Image (cartoon, grey):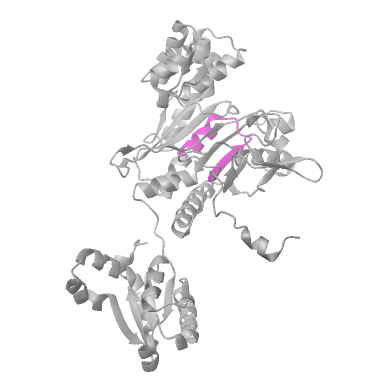
Amino acid sequence: MSSPASSAEFRPKARRPRGFMDRRGATLAQERAIVDKVLAVYQSWGFERLETSAFEYADALGKFLPDQDRPNEGVFALQDDDEQWMALRYDLTAPLARFVAENYDALPKPYRRCAAGPVWRNEKPGPGRFREFWQCDADTVGAASPAADAEMIAMAGEALEAAGVPAGKFALKYSSRRALDGVLRLAGVAADDTRTRLTVLRAIDKLDRLGADGVRALLGAGRKDESGDFTPGAGLSAAQAETVLGFFAAKDALAAMRANEAAFAATGALAELEQIAATLDRLGAAGFARLDPSIVRGLEYYTGAVFEAELLIETTDEAGRPVRFGSVGGGGRYDDLVSRFKGQPIPATGFSIGVSRLAAALAHAGAEAAFDGPIVVLPFDAEAMAECFAIARELRVRLDRPAEVYLGGSGPKAQLKYADKRGAPVAVIIGTDERAAGQATVKDLVLGASLAAKAGDDREAYAALREKVQVTVPRADLVAQVARMLAAPHAEGAR
């Protein structure tokens, strides 16, 4: 056993695991506001809330994760005491597939569910790429019609607007995996050549990042990146590669498909995309939804329609360079996922919004949600502590707003700094003079910060405005005065 002295020698280093985030009040408020607004849209379209556990059995996640011998590759897994491997959920779709299969007879068909929560991926972290993040999903299980895919696209647009993305500042791009099958058929690639198909799919998925030349290399022999790493290509001939690229460069993809009807009608892509387009038009989504055949999505479980939400908000970073946010959500049809459990065809389609990514994009673009910290009651007189607690309780009950009492041991200046760091819109001060006179001083911290910024270093100018910021009122008028400050126009959305 170690002695107390030796135990005290070890001090663990305070550090976050790589790829994980700590989130405080304002960030959490932004993310939860997005979740609440998006789920409200999903539910208004008739989708039922469902919450599944964080852990699933690793074999239920299936081949749609990195196919490795070790269950912990791609996911965070552990072995239970019954020697079965469990893994933190990789997304919200695999748990849905398990739930539907487990409760199939009791569920309405189609089954329409929405969900929100954290997911975990054991992948290499990087800028904007985290190992834990929130998703907000909607899925329809049991509907084979392309109209179900169109509904997802239209609803996703409404959800993004509800979350705070202005109309015209996003696009819902869609296509179909069957269109890729038609292109490969047109290029003369055998239908059963799975390796070539997957390699082409992954190459096209990089079109916006690598451009036509980079993808051309990946369609052919392969490509060496800036680091010197070589990625083997699909092995298409130059003519085959140009056929593939030519289709994805077409300005009117439906017209290009109709011009080669034999190849695309055989895969079902033409009829599928025409019905999606017609349904989107009737849903009023034609303004933000558009067919883009380069949308193929990376995951292998998609079997038909695929879609992606792209932000078009223009902003710059600290150095004045343009920032492109790109995709903040996506989804598609995955007709084989539930079928793995049931051994029978069960169609499904869904859409997922990356909550953390969307919140970060909105905050960067200046559309951060309002966040009000608590009203803070400051006991400048230590003997006033009990009265301060009574005031905080009264503010909570009568104004239905969070309120707290400063419990530190510092003086007035530090107490005001504390209130500012808490994001308090208003501070209530109870000092010796106030307590003796049965009064309270109320300070509008939002207005004070605004006036201080305008006055700059001119102390006299700020002093002249102080009476607007801080007033002393009878104790009986305290709650009414706080309410007036909270309702002032300058306070709306200030935090």
Residue 493, magenta (yes or no):
no
Q: Quadrant of residue 476?
A: bottom left
**Residue 146 vertical position relative to residue 122 in the rendered view, above or below:** above
Q: Residue 336 at x, y = what percent?
A: 65, 28
Is residue 195 visible in the rendered image? The answer is yes
Q: Quadrant of the N terminus?
A: bottom right
Q: Residue 325 at x, y = what percent?
A: 39, 38
Query: What residue is at 62 percent from the left and 12 percent from the top?
Result: 192
Q: Residue 359 at x, y = what percent?
A: 44, 48
Query: What residue is at 47 percent from the left and 71 percent from the top?
Result: 402
Pick the front one: 74 or 33: 74
**Residue 104 vertical position relative to residue 406 in the rendered view, above or below:** above
Pick the front one: 128 or 202: 128
- Left or right: 443 in relation to 123: left
Residue at the bottom extreme, as displayed: 436
Pick the front one: 203 or 147: 203
Query: What residue is at 51 percent from the left and 19 percent from the top?
Result: 231
Q: Quadrant of the C terminus?
A: bottom left
Q: Residue 449 at x, y = what percent?
A: 29, 67
**Residue 238 vertical position relative to residue 265 in the rendered view, above or below:** above
**Residue 112 vertical position relative to residue 146 in the rendered view, above or below:** below
- Left or right: 458 in relation to 67: left
Query: What residue is at 60 percent from the left and 12 percent from the top?
Result: 193
Q: Which residues are magenta?
A: 133-154
Q: How many marks?
A: 0
Residue at the right extreme, as displayed: 82
Residue 135, magenta (yes or no):
yes
Q: Quadrant of residue 436?
A: bottom left
